[in-house]
Amino acid sequence: MFNWLFYVYTERDGALNQDTQLENITGFVGNVTDDANIFTGESYHTTELVVTKAFISNGGELKKIQLRVRDRDADITCMVNEHSAVVLSSNLSYKLRILDSTEKSTFLLLYLYAYLILKLKQLYNDESEKFINEDNPNFSRKIGIDVIKSIVEKNNITMKDIQSFLSLDQHEEEIESVTKLIP
């Protein structure tokens, strides 16, 4: 589900549905290959960082995500882990409509646990099959190419550099796709 949220934020400008907007992803924790290899990222621009894209593209599994979600009732910033444990940033979260006299912090906790987490899970479940089978592989490929392009440009990598570790006979298709990225 967390990788899907990253996808929605990046590819659909955060539009979860017509009423709910993923405003930002500011941090995450994930496993690269197993529970001993943990990767953490935290930045206001987490989704734009090359290292984040490399992690997601390489099949890294997100275990915890820090996000900001807004709809007509609330604007909530929180951290959610894979077991639905939540840390609410109450100083960054707001009750947008006065639904009743419920105190802000009580409202936000009830809203988060009784509504928002369940809604995010339902939205993911509705799209999960298509995401897993189609969207995620294509998205991983796209951001993987972004990572390669960034590294090639940053380090002035040439085709000769690429050919030094790839055999033309065995990897003709890979070389052709990389060649398109190199100026």
Image: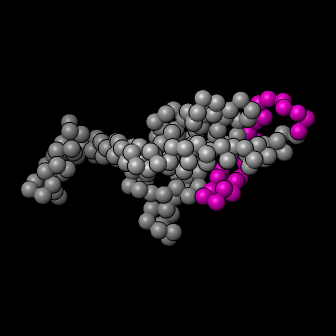
Residue 91 versus residue 169: which sits nearer the camera?
169
> Considering only vertical position in the picture, is 12 above or below 63?
above
In the displayed image of the protein, which residue is found farthest to the bottom?
36
- What residue is shown at x 52% (from left), y 58% (from top)? 30
Image coordinates of residue 56 in percent, x first then y, are 43, 51
**Looking at the image, can residue 95 be seen?**
yes
Image coordinates of residue 76 in percent, x first then y, are 70, 40
Residue 28 versus residue 155: which sits nearer the camera?
28
Region of the chain picked out in magenta, as a range: 79-102
How many numbered markers are drawn? 0
Within the magenta stretch, is there residue 152? no
- What residue is shown at x 37% (from left), y 48% (from top)? 137
Residue 171 versus residue 37: which sits nearer the camera?
171
Question: What is the quadrant of the C terminus in the image?
Answer: top left
Image coordinates of residue 126 in percent, x first then y, are 55, 44
- What residue is shown at x 60% (from left), y 29% (from top)? 18
In the displayed image of the protein, which residue is found farthest to the right?
101
**Looking at the image, can residue 90 be seen?**
no
* Left or right of 4 on screen, residue 53: left
Within the magenta stretch, is there residue 93? yes
- What residue is shown at x 45% (from left), y 46% (from top)? 131
* Left or right of 22 on screen, residue 87: right
